[in-house]
Amino acid sequence: MKICLVSDYLVEYHPNWSGAELVCQFLASLLEKKEKVFFLTTNPKKKTAENVFVVPVLNSLGFLKKIIPLHLPVRTLAVFFHLLRIRPDVIHLFHTNSLFIPTLLAAKILKIPATFTVLDYWILCPTGHLRLQDGSICREGQGDNCKKCVSLMKLWERKLVLWLSRDLKDIITFTETSKRRMVEYGFPEEKIRVQYVYNFKMALQKREKEIYDVLFVGTFKPQKGLHIVIKAMAEVLKKIPSSRLTVVGRGMGQDQERIEELAKKEKVLDSIDFLGQKENRDVLRIVSQSKVMVVAEQWFSDFGPVALVEAMAQGRGLVSGNLGSASDFIREGQSGFLVDYDKPDQFAEKIICLLQDQGKRELMGRQAEKSIEHFFLPEHKEKIFNLYTSL
């Protein structure tokens, strides 16, 4: 059986990967044990393996793409000929907006069944994160209101996305919360399957010495909530002046400038260690050595996020915004703390609590680890394999 995985970015080939790409990588490693796996992706930064096929994104077109969508037929032709060469039995689309339309158009012509694994909400929203330009959460659903955020050309592309989405054989969500959201937006419930698709090798001593006080893992984009954590740290430092925030992740352009300016304004810059992007094995090690992990998503991240699950699996103290599917994983006050997602003072209160009470954070950590241990059993991997090979 030949399986083609489609993702804009891949861990080994692009610098700007995140949890979504880790999921794709994990699934590939699982399927490759028994099936032939191929990839479609956008322009990589290094030479690709023979089973990785590259589709041009045509960034050089710039503003012209907003007027004349030349990129769509070019990408579709590229995908078409790649699929013609691969001849996959099934296509799985992941974290992608550049390749969604071209892949489904080509699949429709070639009559190849396709499924979509929901790792962001681009399929529901042209920005991918259900947030308006002012930073507030969009609760209106896609339609004419989308013109507040994107161009008329993008609105036309949304109609094409919705039309092609009807051809999806199945849709995979990680949580019941994510499934409900997809149904609310009009996707057929009978097409949606719930399966948490991630695992990682715990080749670490999970009880390593706690080196890092407060840890944030993610990009500097507003929807990830680093600005909330920085504001919370300003309050934490008033109570625990020696505490430090460690940030693992990448900031680009305006996002990096915005975070640095905020840290200066809140007078916490000297108490933050920016470690940059790290390999996943290094991230796991840092997580295992942290006292408190903070997840401050400012959008409906109904798929974990991956960093949250990794922290729970390693028994870390956890403070998360109560938004999206966070409550699907965390039992408030038992396996972690849930607070209002956009309230830095609430984050600060719980961070201080865990930093000052080692016994509480260790107890919560053990309960968190126990609550998701079923994700790491051999039969869990078998369920994932059976799900994807039966689609």
Image (cartoon, rainbow, N blue to C red):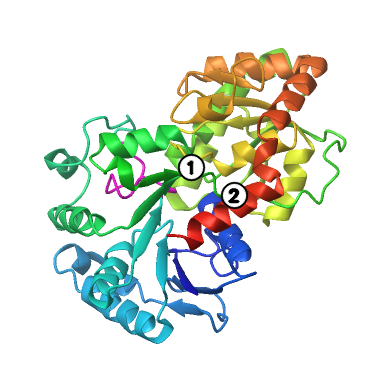
Q: Are marks 2 and 1 in contact (CB under 8 Å)?
A: yes
Q: Which mark is residue 174?
A: 1
Query: Crowdedness of circle 2 by 10 Å Cα count: few (<14), some, many (20+)?
Result: many
Instruction: Report x, y in % for residue 371.
Output: 67, 29
Instruction: Report x, y in % for residue 214.
Output: 69, 30
Of the pair 106 and 353, the residue shown nearer to us: 106
Query: Which residue matches tag 2?
Result: 198
Asked whether, in this view, residue 130 is left or right of residue 160, the answer is right
| Vertical side of 232 occupied by 247: above or below | below
| Vertical side of 248 occupied by 339: above or below | above
Which stretch is magenta? Answer: 118-133
Identify which amino acid the numbered label 1 is placed on: Phe
Asked whether residue 214 appears in the rendered view, the answer is yes
Answer whether residue 202 is magenta in the image: no
Answer whether residue 121 is magenta in the image: yes
Disc 2 is placed on an element classified as loop
